Amino acid sequence: KDHQVDIEFNVSNAGPVIDKDIYGQFAEHLGRGIYEGVWVGEDSDIPNTRGFRNDVLNALKEIKVPLVRWPGGCFADEYHWREGIGPRNERPVKVNTHWGGVEEPNTFGTHEFFEFVELLGADAYVNGNLGSGSVREMAEWVEYMTGEKGSTLANERRANGREEPFEIAYFGIGNEAWGCGGHMRPEYYSDLYKQYATFLKTPHGKKPKFVASGGHSEDTTWTDVLSANIEQNIDGISYHYYTLPSGDWDAKGRAINFTEDEWLATMNRTYKIDGYIRDNVAVLEKNDPDGDVKLYVDEWGTWYDPEPERDPGFLYQQNTLRDAVVAAVNFNIFHKYAERVTMTNIAQMVNVLQAMILTDKEKMVLTPTYHTYGMYKVFQDATSIPFEIETGNYGSGDKSVPAVTASVARGTDGKLYLALVNLDPKNGASIDLDVDGAKLTKAVGHILTANELDARNTFAAPEQLQPAAFEASLKDFDIPAKSVVVVELK
Ligand code: AHR
């Protein structure tokens, strides 16, 4: 039976702005994320612009990627920036001990990263090495990137081909300090953070937002200790949450050929981030009532078991309609907390985990998740409109979740947008809008849906799943099972 969904709002009410950086991406030196996925080198047969794949660049521009985080992740705490500058053929080859034990040629380094984000029209989020680096190494990297004067470091950047300083939007001081970043206690990390942050000097007006590396999943201790101990030089605390269908790191669940029970478990685990963000935000409200310190969800997304024939260290996984629905559920949750959650990065951009894009040599596939980003781009920097929603549940017992979630916002183009996600794979939803302040009659936009739970795009059939035009009268506004809908309300 279809769900009855009632949504009520007043178009004149304004909530917080949905920061465009909520739609940020994460690109780590992991598997084929950077090498092959983004960077093929200038001599490649694959069409490229100064070494960057044209197909990938064009596809990412299309969804208006606002921000890219690099070089990790766990890799960040093993990365030594000096190894990634200067003539490419003279850079040292390392072993990527975290991810697959493969050779890391360092051909994609600081200059290549900034060139990449500039080609995309995106901002840069650079993650520094606190775990195995030093205060001096990090401070010198920041000076190398941002220096305006004639210092030796700034001149070295110029000699390497970049006259103007690079602009860093966010700078992360370590990553997952509780784990791969050094297995620290939050008290110890927060002391180190203060020491490191003190020495990261930039020219006047060029200081990036500083990110302290926080906790994950249900934990709020890191947010609590960090926000209580670090009084200055901090703009946000990072938080990570991955959706594993089973919740078990040893047997996470399948990316394709899964059952409806696994679909439900995935939705249930995705939805948990709502409570986790609420709890972390409550801790920030206590320690930082002025709202100066934000919660940056700088890693999130689905994480499945690796395909048997692939290198397990590469974290390559297929992406289906289920991932598109998971992304949309997350966006609706992030929008709800837009006051404190002003930046997130999905893990990861190309060929890794819940990717936008999969590549195989010269071939490229846009995933269902990519299409969700495309449909939701109208929410970048939109002003949220508070709303009430009543909906039935999907699933029973402790696994049950709200069947439909939504977002309402006024776009930067002045238009009124509504996003709806129906998580229920069997039943449609009938939407009843009770709107004050405007006479609206129809909904016009796009829908992403399919018959199969694991509908997907493959290299053999790359356009199986694509957004289709959607139009409905508000008198008769139904959306199908397992669908993502983004419409302008007119
Ligand atoms: O995204 C993959 C890894 O997950 C990141 O490197 C790490 O920060 C997290 O554990």
Image: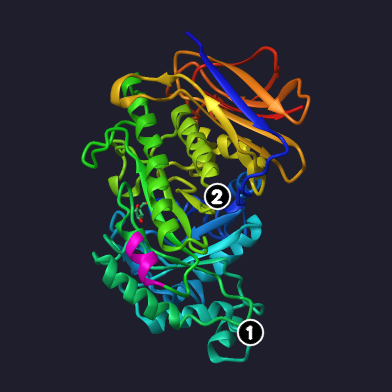
Magenta highlight on residue 226: yes
Q: Quadrant of residue 128?
A: bottom left
Q: Is 226 placed above or below 427 here?
A: below
Is any part of residue 147 visible from this angle? yes
Single out the residue that lies furthest toward the top. Answer: 1
**Crowding near the residue tagged with mark 1, few <14, some 14–19, many ≥20 C-alpha atoms within 10 Å:** some
Residue behind mark 2: 22
- Mark 1: amino acid: Glu
Q: Is 129 placed above or below 431 here?
A: below
Q: In x, y percent, where is residue 319?
A: 44, 34
**At x 61% / y 76%, what residue is drawn?**
206
| Distance (Cα) linking label 1 and label 2 | 30 Å
Q: Quadrant of residue 238?
A: bottom left
- Mark 2: amino acid: Ile
**Helix or strand or loop: what does disc 1 sit on?**
loop
Q: From the viewer's perspective, tell me whether residue 232 is left or right of residue 15.
A: left
**Crowding near the residue tagged with mark 2, few <14, some 14–19, many ≥20 C-alpha atoms within 10 Å:** many
**At x 44% / y 28%, what residue is drawn?**
322
**At x 55% / y 38%, what residue is drawn?**
370
- Which portion, as a residue range, is magenta? 224-230
Q: In x, y percent, where is residue 258?
A: 33, 24
Q: Is mark 2 within 8 Å of ligand 1?
A: no
Magenta highlight on residue 270: no
Tell whether label 2 touches label 1 (CB within 8 Å).
Answer: no
Q: In x, y percent, where is residue 455?
A: 47, 23
Q: In x, y percent, where is residue 177?
A: 31, 64
Residue behind mark 1: 148
Mark positioned earlier in the residue sequence (1 or 2): 2
**At x 45% / y 48%, what residue is drawn?**
348
Magenta stretch: dominant secondary structure: helix
Q: How many marks?
A: 2
